[in-house]
């Protein structure tokens, strides 16, 4: 690739709407351009990085015994109605009609299409397992597309699916994907962790998310410092060893708390600790309002609520619902007198002498006793784990680092095969449902996550396996014939040696070239200038460490190979 003719529109400044490093750098380095909200064009260098990820994925999927296919992006609504997701997928599903007024959607994922394919073809247990995958653009009309390629509306995904005759087979498919994902993210040189993930309505332990560790991650991981337990906080169980409180307190009284609608406001006004306030949140679960109680210093975990209620959809109630249910504006809900189901976190068992909302504007109650003054439907683990909680497996100390979900593997069981009647005949000629699994990797998100983890104030520092170009060759003086000729010679040599190289042959000042080389993030830089050539050397720079050196023109091939090897080894060691 020659810089003078390549399409690499770098920017000096970060666009104002770019918040995280990867978003800024992908735009600044001329790798991606926004077309409209959450929809991007991958420019040549960005596309190369995506292709590099795809190559590694293809190699590992092949090893795991999965075959690649390519399904249509446009999917008929009928299949989604069969699975029930035409209703439940909600607004993320982009729906439209064709000229004959038939409903369609753009594929956000392909369980329906692949189940339809396989059920039409597979009759006997002898044809199982079926293990397939594709790499394709997906569309999800995300509520908040943000962070560039990290959460786009259109993005590249690898999605794999398995169909097995029995549980042992399904577990084997799952295990193969767990191992393949571990190999993929390791080869990509990312610092990552596989964590237990929520399995929602399907239940069971068979779901793992692969998280790239980064402070800008939207997910939080609960990781034990003493054992190998790691789970998404959405799922991490809170151990509660407390005893239900048996104290009694004075009669409940109502007090004025003008304008105090947050726990902190109320706690300060009534001079109690936030942990002595009961936070009452109104949710809507499958259309019905419910109240959830947690201590004022805790956060409700809506995934736990959803699982407890076996609901399809749980969301925070809007102001109108809150008013209808509590007869008060948002901020004054309390358990006493509520006429909807009330679910309380387990640690509130026997809670006595608490402050809570009075279900009346600008008022709270004091001396609330949950047993005496409210009707609690059930107590359960309903809050998010905190750093002060113990590891649910070993009781050890936990940490809560941030992560970016780059992959998700899931044992689906019979969810789709039952809904869509995907059956086969077993050894005894008996009809059975196929046992399914699905396995996703956010390919374009991987590129963003890698940049998030590998950058500095000068730009991107690409992990070697992902780098769109492995080496940038800077010709500092393209106007001088001998310098240009040398640069061309080295360019040809490096390409012949199998490297991907970008020759910066532009008529630009050296300062501009140095800056762009750092910004683009190729792991290796070679600098060809008149002064060096006069001494028979070219300069080399390791982008990751910033270390510079010189390579002799005489015996260049060996000297370069040895240096490149050092860069590679240093990079590998830095991954631990
Ligand atoms: P998230 O919780 O981040 O929305 P998800 O649980 O909806 O992810 P899956 O349905 O499991 O994601 O999709 C498989 C993979 O696709 C995810 O692990 C993630 O890497 C990627 N992915 C999902 N949504 C997006 C998006 N909007 N933009 C880019 N990649 C995405
Ligand atoms: Mg999502």
Image (tube, rainbow, N blue to C red):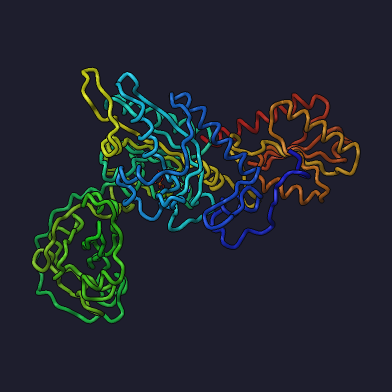
**223 relative to 272, above or below:** above
Choose top left, top right, bottom left or bottom right for residue 347.
Answer: bottom left
Q: Is residue 153 left or right of residue 422?
A: right
User: Where residue 174 sits in the image (x, y, percent)?
Assistant: 35, 30
Residue 217: tell me if it is visible.
Answer: yes
Residue at 80% across / 42% down in the picture? 505
Choose top left, top right, bottom left or bottom right for residue 434.
Answer: top left
Q: Is residue 456 left or right of residue 275?
A: right
Q: Residue furthest front?
A: 100
- Nearest the camera: 510 or 75? 75
- Nearest the camera: 397 or 567? 567
Residue at 71% across / 48% down in the picture? 516
Residue at 22% across / 63% down in the picture? 289
Quarter of the N terminus within the rendering: top right
User: Where residue 232 sits in the image (x, y, percent)?
Assistant: 35, 46
Residue 224: tell me if it is visible.
Answer: no
Q: Is residue 526 left or right of residue 310?
A: right
**344 relative to 159, above or below:** below
Q: Count every numbered label the image shows and give the total.
A: 0
User: Where residue 526 sits in the image (x, y, percent)?
Assistant: 75, 37
Q: Is residue 14 left or right of residue 225?
A: right
Choose top left, top right, bottom left or bottom right for residue 428.
Answer: top left
């Amino acid at each position: 690739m020659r810089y003078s003719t390549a399409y690499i529109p770098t920017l000096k400044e970060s666009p104002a709407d770019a918040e995280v490093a990867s978003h800024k750098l992908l735009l600044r380095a001329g790798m991606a351009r926004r077309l409209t909200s959450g929809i991007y064009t991958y420019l040549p260098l960005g596309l190369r990085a995506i292709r590099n990820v795809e190559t590694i994925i293809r190699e590992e999927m092949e090893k795991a015994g999965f075959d690649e296919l390519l399904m249509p992006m446009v999917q008929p609504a009928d299949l989604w109605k069969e699975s029930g997701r035409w209703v439940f997928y909600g607004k993320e599903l982009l729906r439209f009609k064709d000229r004959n007024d038939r409903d369609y959607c753009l594929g956000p994922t392909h369980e329906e299409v692949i189940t339809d394919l396989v059920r039409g073809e597979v009759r006997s247990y002898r044809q199982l397992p079926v293990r397939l995958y594709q790499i394709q653009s997906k569309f999800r009309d995300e509520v908040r597309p943000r962070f560039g390629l990290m959460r786009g509306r259109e993005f590249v995904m690898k999605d794999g699916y398995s169909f097995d005759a029995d549980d042992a087979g399904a577990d084997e498919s799952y295990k193969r994907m767990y191992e393949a994902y571990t190999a993929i993210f390791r080869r990509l040189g990312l610092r990552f962790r596989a964590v237990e993930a929520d399995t929602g309505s399907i239940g069971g332990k068979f779901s793992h998310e692969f998280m790239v560790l980064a402070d800008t991650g939207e997910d939080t991981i609960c990781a034990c410092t003493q054992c190998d337990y790691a789970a998404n906080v959405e799922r991490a169980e809170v151990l509660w060893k407390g005893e239900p409180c048996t104290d009694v307190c004075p009669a409940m009284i109502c007090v004025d708390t003008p304008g105090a609608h947050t726990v902190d406001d109320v706690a300060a006004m009534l001079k109690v600790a936030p942990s002595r306030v009961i936070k009452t949140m109104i949710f809507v679960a499958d259309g019905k309002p419910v109240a959830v109680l947690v201590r004022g210093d805790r956060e409700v975990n809506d995934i736990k609520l959803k699982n407890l209620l076996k609901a399809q959809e749980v969301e925070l109630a809007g102001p109108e619902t809150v008013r209808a249910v509590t007869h008060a504006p948002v901020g004054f809900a309390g358990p006493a007198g509520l006429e909807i189901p009330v679910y309380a976190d387990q640690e509130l068992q026997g809670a006595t002498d608490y402050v809570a909302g009075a279900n009346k504007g600008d008022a709270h109650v004091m001396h609330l006793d949950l047993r005496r003054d409210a009707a609690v439907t059930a107590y359960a683990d309903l809050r998010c784990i905190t750093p002060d909680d113990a590891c649910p497996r070993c009781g050890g100390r936990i940490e809560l680092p941030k992560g970016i979900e780059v992959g998700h593997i899931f044992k689906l069981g019979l969810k789709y095969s039952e809904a869509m009647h995907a059956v086969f005949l077993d050894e005894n000629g008996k009809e059975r449902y196929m046992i399914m699994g699905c396995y996703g990797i956010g390919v374009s998100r991987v590129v963003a996550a890698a940049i998030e983890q590998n950058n500095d104030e000068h730009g991107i520092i690409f992990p070697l396996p992902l780098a769109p170009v492995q080496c940038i060759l800077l010709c500092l003086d393209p106007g001088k014939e001998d310098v240009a000729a040398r640069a061309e010679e080295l360019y040809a040599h490096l390409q012949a040696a199998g490297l991907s190289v970008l020759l910066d042959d532009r008529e630009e000042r050296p300062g501009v070239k140095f800056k762009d080389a750092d910004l683009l993030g190729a792991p290796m830089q070679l600098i060809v200038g008149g002064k060096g050539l006069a001494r028979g050397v070219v300069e080399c720079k390791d982008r990751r460490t910033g270390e510079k050196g010189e390579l002799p023109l005489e015996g260049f091939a060996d000297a370069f190979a040895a240096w490149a090897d050092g860069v590679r080894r240093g990079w590998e060691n830095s991954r631990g």
